[in-house]
Amino acid sequence: MSWSRFGSAMMALAVAVFGWTPVAAQQAPVRTVTLQEAVEMTLRNSPVMVQRRGQVDISESAERTTIGDFLPSLSFSSGASLASTERFDSNTGVVVSGSSDSYNARLSSSLTLFDAGRRFAARSQAKSQTAQAEANLVEQQFAVTLNAKQAFFDVIRLGENIRVVEANLERAQQTLRAAKQRFAVGSATTSDTLRGQLEVNQARQAVLQVESQRRSAMYSLGALVGLDGPVAADSTTPTAATPLTMSDEELVQLAITASPAVRTAELVVDANDAATRVAHAQWWPTLSASGGLTWSNQTASFSGGRNSWNTGLSLSYPLFNGFAREDANERAGVNLRVSQAQFDDARRQARANAQRAIDAVRLAEQQITLSQEAVAVAEEDLRVQQVRYELNASTILDQIASRAALVQSELNLISARYDYLIARAELEALIGREIQ
């Protein structure tokens, strides 16, 4: 027995007895996800989404600090000291050394009574920034959802493409068999069999290419949803084109009034308007109240000691601070004007983008209808050419051309259907809500 046969026999024995499978033959199972699972997993694992959620948390924390500006500050301090002292004793005529102990504790508080509305403006600014961060989160959520849908639909589309090219391979093999049969009886030339074989080879290459594209798409989907390895898309996901429930005018109006991009630009205007009021408040004086309690003792004991308290009002107004107030007001005014211009531009862009997205949806709808008609025509044309070829009324080139037209028509129909789904998802990402 040769070593190769001995090795094969031992491997077969290991599989039969221990259920062991060679590492090369072990393949990780491919995870299949639905569209909803793909979207949820992508939203959960997207680094951009984690960043945007963190920005919302930071904005909410900053908003809480503006509430603290309305509350009095409270601080506590304590201390102990030991100092050496020297004195002249007149009775003995010598210098006597000693020490002096001191212990104290202080509780103090202060509150701003008047600041020309600076705290209210700062709170309004913080609330606008929180709402802005939330709008950015919604906008990014739909952008990530769009990416997830594109990757998911790409896997399904390529799966349908595989079925088309495999069917084309089967038809090419049937044509080759027919050409060989006709050649055997002398009703076809060698050129027919050669061209038939060439078509079979090209059809096999098409199958390999589409399979390779689908594997790449599955790995891309896996990376997007946060899984190692390829991820398959659930082929039972409904992919039929459903008509829009809103009119074009309603969609455009929704885009220019409530889309995340427009909403974000509007909140930037509100935040900059509040920042302008904060800057204007620097021209007014600030009135504050303060108070405190102090306890001190010469010994480390809570009994005895001296207590004292203090309270007061303070008014501060910087007469000159190196033109800092003027600079702050100028910057705030410029930022406000810029944000207003950006808000107007965002509305115009939202209108243009909404119309573009709606046109893409309408175009995809028409392409689906035309592609369906083209597939029906191409199927009938191929049937006629097959009959004519069997009757020796046409050449194999006519049948090859008809088959190529059918394959292209079927691929165009698949592309049109998924172009519609992507165009619809882009429209939903633009307006910031799902269209039922």
Image (tube, rainbow, N blue to C red):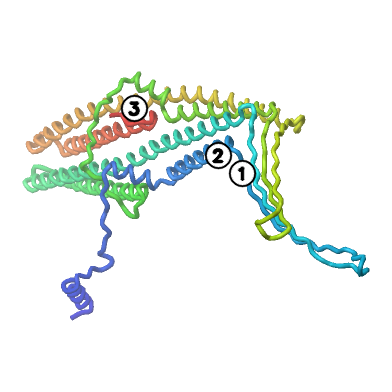
Q: CA distance from mark 2 to mark 1?
A: 15 Å
Label 2 neighbourhood size at 10 Å, few (<14), some (14-19), many (20+)? some
At a point 38% along the width and 23% down the height, the residue shown is: 254
Q: Residue furthest bottom?
A: 1
First in residue order: circle 1 vs circle 3: 1
Q: Amino acid at mark 2?
A: Thr
The answer to whether residue 97 is visible is yes
Q: Which mark is residue 74?
A: 1
Q: Is residue 210 above or below residue 22?
A: above
At a point 86% along the width and 67% down the height, the residue shown is: 96
Q: Which of the two residues, 347 or 88, is positioned nearer the viewer here? A: 88
First in residue order: circle 2 vs circle 3: 2
Q: Is residue 201 above or below residue 96?
A: above
Q: Is residue 293 above or below residue 287?
A: below
Which residue corresponds to mark 2? 65
At a point 53% along the width and 27% down the height, the residue shown is: 270
Q: Quadrant of residue 235?
A: top left
Which residue corresponds to mark 3? 360
